[in-house]
Amino acid sequence: MKRSTRTAVALLAAGGLMLTAAGCGGDDQDTVSGGPPPNTVKLPNLKGQKLQVTAVWTGTEQENFTKVLKEFEKRTGAKVSFVPSGDDMAGFVGSKIAGGAPPDVAMVGQVGVMREFAQKGWAKPLDADASAELAKNFAKGWQDLGSYQGKPYGVYFKASNKSLLWYNTSAFDYAGAKVPKTWKEFLEQAQLISDSGTDAVAIGGQDGWTLTDWFENVYLSQAGPEKYDQLAQHKIKWTDPSVKKALETLADLWGTKGLVAGGRGGALQTAFPDSVTKAFGNKAEPDAGMVFEADFVAANVADAGAELDQDAKVFPFPAVGDKEPVVTGGDVGVALKNSKAAQALLTFLASPDAGTIWAQSGGFISANKNVKLSAYPNASMRKIAQALIAAGNDFRFDMSDQAPASFGGKPAQGEWKALQDFLKNPRNVEGIQRQLEADAAKAYKN
């Protein structure tokens, strides 16, 4: 399962992500976030009722989600308990269903898992109130993501923009580098940083999911959404020429000496959080000039002792083809019990009220178009959220999360393992294609 939201959606935002070199652009809306959330949604009196909610979130994410649940308790009188599911949400819920005691609501991180729950009858369709709140606040595309066979089942409460490159301002200034807009410019600036004495890009290759995100950004921008859909559904093979082209594009970065921090071997031994530390742990003399990943990098930047919008700034994933890609993740809330209380919680999660609470706490992006940008704590997060909303309905799910878990979501196998092997030897393009196709054919057949 992937970091933070454990799923991804790919979007082609018209006009691209509106971030400048300072991590912002357009109207900054520099209103300080904070204050009470809005009260825009009518909820029933649930005094005396108890709900159990499960999600993969732990630590700070769990604490921030608990703030949302506390507000729901305050407004309804219900009592809500939170139970971490662990990364294997399907296994956790399946065991609870088998035992006759499922949680009331699950926050599911993969669209395939949500649809599996609906297909099995575990998930319950949204009622009229939850459906109405969803329709009022979310673009049709997000509504469709939470639907199964034309019926709305889920609310995409938490999203994450995963097409961002974060750069160390000291490294860029020292090298005289500029923010690139195209892949060609990106490679040129990466070489400039390398020539200045700092490896260009830190890659958390120990976590195979980061490598799938690299591939998906390149493939979506280069091959386009139609090919992306076909590959995601395995309607074309991984031996297709479009896959070869994307891998060769990645090899231009991964296979060039000095562009990957610590070399390819070092990257394969670097966990995602450590890749952020390489770029920002030593602000003045970093081990890498840039790191790629989602908005949740902001939390790791802070952990590394750097300051967002000063030491660390962000730019959109460069256009490999005609458009800049945007990859985002999402956790969808679904009811596992057909109860008034479960539906009321989903109604609340579909409101701007709930999204505002977590947005103010940080580490959160909402696809809810009525969560005000001023709720976000800094300019970078406001712009990331703005780009997500601006994408409207023009999006694609992350390919690996559409795939069977045995191919797209498991360590040391399938796509994760194949792309790690490719990082180890970027010259073996056709061999990796054959490996990917063999694993995909087996997974999609089962």
Image (cartoon, rainbow, N blue to C red):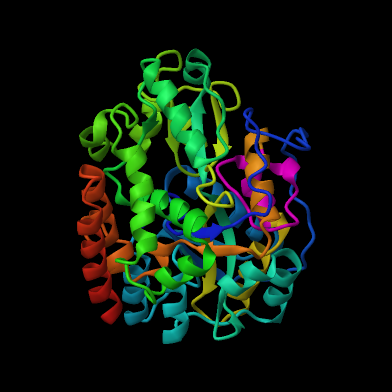
Q: Residue at x 61, y 54 (%)?
A: 68
Q: Residue at x 70, y 54 (%)?
A: 390
- Placement of the N terminus among the 4 image quadrants: bottom left
In front: 53, or 115? 115
Q: For the magenta stretch, what is the residue range? A: 354-376
Q: Is residue 370 magenta?
A: yes
Measuring from the top left, give residue 99's x and y in whole percent: 32, 79
> Residue 417, image x and y in percent?
23, 55
214 within the magenta span? no
Asked if one can make out residue 9 in the rendered structure from this viewpoint, the answer is yes
Q: Horizontal placement of 14 versus 290: left or right?
A: right
At horizontal 35% and vertical 22% (from top left) the residue drawn is: 287
Q: Is residue 42 above or below residue 336?
A: above
**Side of 388 relative to 255 (left or right):** right
| Residue located 29% across and 59% down the image | 415
Can residue 86 be seen from the camera position used here?
Answer: no
Viewer-nearest residue: 176 or 151: 176
